């Protein structure tokens, strides 16, 4: 017989309706947000009718498919390992380039084994990439190669970041571009490219980002030092990228306005560094929560190495910059 005053209180698990109600509402709102942004890409102006809004599906559907696959990869792996994990909470943001800030998942408990940590951390990026790659390949094939305007003549032209993988796909599918030409991505191609960008950002080996989970599963407590160094490296990276693009424009005889514009090419790394620093201040530390074991199976070790190599081939020095 137990004493009611000393018996631990077990928290009631919410019903499926209670657990999924808010995530589903946020998913619908985020789909609407990306639909709106997609219609802006297709029309160049705000939609005025439902038909014009629905035209944004060529961007919204592939992008949300990639993001949903990413988040469900985490969620399903968490449930398989019996981790108390929440459904994904998507964040609508119609005033942003993509119409969303992605999604977050809460883990209401510690992941106790390195195998589980690797599975949960790597499943999201790998699932997202499984959809991002075919979407991007289709998008590149259907995107035209066009002549670029003169520098500074178009204030709205945005250049997407290039990674090793993205450059390889462009060369394989389109060949070498003539001088002064570049690919003009369709809305669907941009959604596929965004999948690469989102995966790269999540794979930064820091704290409790996906890359932090994977790196901790592989390196153990040594990952905590990697996280601390990342906080120092990101602002330095921003300066290096800015100096490269700004310096190149200066040597090419660009105007002061163009030099200053290109000097901001790496500012996204600085902003993200500030965000990560803020996360450490809120959490009180950049260290990853420890696991109860030091075991990582050989197969999962290979998956961890592959996932970290994926970060390298997805790495974009500049995410986006104005032409």
Image (cartoon, helix red, strand yellow):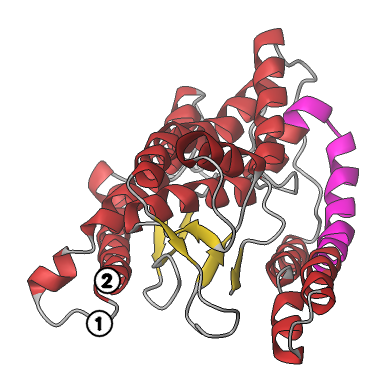
Task: Quadrant for residue 253, please give it.
Answer: bottom right
Classified by dominant secondary structure, the portion drawn in magenta counts as helix
Q: Give the residue at the far front of this rendering.
A: 178
Q: Nearer the viewer, residue 304 or 141?
A: 141
- Which numbered tag is attached to residue 36? 2
Q: Is residue 257 left or right of residue 126?
A: right
| Residue 225 is inside the magenta segment | yes
Q: Position of residue 54 (x, y in %)?
A: 15, 64
Residue at figure coordinates x 87%, y 35% from the top left: 221
Q: Position of residue 154 (x, y in %)?
A: 50, 82
Secondary-structure class at tag 2:
helix
| Residue 31 is inside the magenta segment | no
Q: Nearer the viewer, residue 48 or 18?
A: 48
Q: Is residue 175 left or right of residue 163?
A: left
Determine whether label 1 and label 2 are within 8 Å by CB: yes
Q: Position of residue 180 (x, y in %)?
A: 57, 64
Residue at figure coordinates x 89%, y 60% from the top left: 232
Q: Residues within 10 Å of mark 1 (few under 14, many from 20)?
A: some
Of mark 1 and mark 2, the one earlier in the sequence is 2
Q: Give the residue at the far top of this rendering.
A: 298
- Which numbered tag is attached to residue 46? 1
Work out which quarter of the rendered image holds the C terminus and state it.
bottom right
Q: Residues within 10 Å of mark 2 (few under 14, many from 20)?
A: many
Whether residue 228 is visible: yes
Residue at figure coordinates x 39%, y 36% from the top left: 131
Q: Which residues are magenta?
A: 216-238
């Amino acid at each position: 017989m137990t004493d009611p005053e000393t018996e631990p209180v077990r928290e009631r698990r919410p019903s499926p309706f209670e657990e999924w109600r808010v995530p589903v509402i946020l998913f619908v709102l985020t789909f609407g947000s990306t639909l709106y942004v997609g219609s802006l890409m297709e029309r160049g102006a705000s939609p005025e009718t439902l038909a014009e809004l629905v035209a944004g599906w060529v961007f919204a559907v592939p992008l949300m498919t990639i993001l949903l696959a990413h988040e469900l990869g985490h969620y399903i792996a968490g449930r398989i390992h019996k981790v108390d994990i929440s459904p994904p909470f998507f964040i609508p943001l119609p005033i942003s380039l993509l119409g969303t800030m992605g999604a977050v998942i809460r883990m209401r408990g510690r992941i106790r084994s390195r195998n589980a940590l690797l599975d949960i951390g790597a499943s999201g990026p790998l699932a997202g990439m499984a959809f991002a790659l075919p979407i991007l390949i289709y998008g590149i094939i259907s995107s035209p190669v066009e002549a670029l305007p003169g520098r500074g003549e178009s204030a709205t032209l945005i250049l997407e970041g290039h990674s090793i993988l993205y450059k390889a796909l462009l060369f394989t599918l389109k060949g070498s571009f003539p001088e002064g030409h570049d690919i003009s991505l369709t809305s669907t191609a941009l959604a596929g490219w965004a999948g690469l960008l989102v995966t790269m950002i999540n794979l930064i080996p820091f704290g409790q980002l996906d890359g932090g989970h994977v790196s901790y599963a592989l390196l153990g407590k040594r990952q905590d030092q990697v996280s601390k160094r990342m906080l120092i490296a990101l602002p330095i990276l921003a300066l290096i990228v800015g100096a490269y693009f700004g310096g190149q424009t200066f040597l090419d005889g660009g105007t002061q306005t163009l030099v200053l514009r290109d000097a901001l090419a790496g500012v996204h790394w600085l902003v993200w560094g500030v965000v990560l620093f803020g996360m450490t201040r809120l959490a009180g530390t950049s260290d990853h929560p420890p696991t109860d074991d030091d075991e990582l199976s050989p197969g999962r070790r290979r998956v961890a190495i592959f996932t970290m190599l994926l970060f390298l081939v997805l790495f974009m020095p500049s995410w986006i910059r104005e032409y």
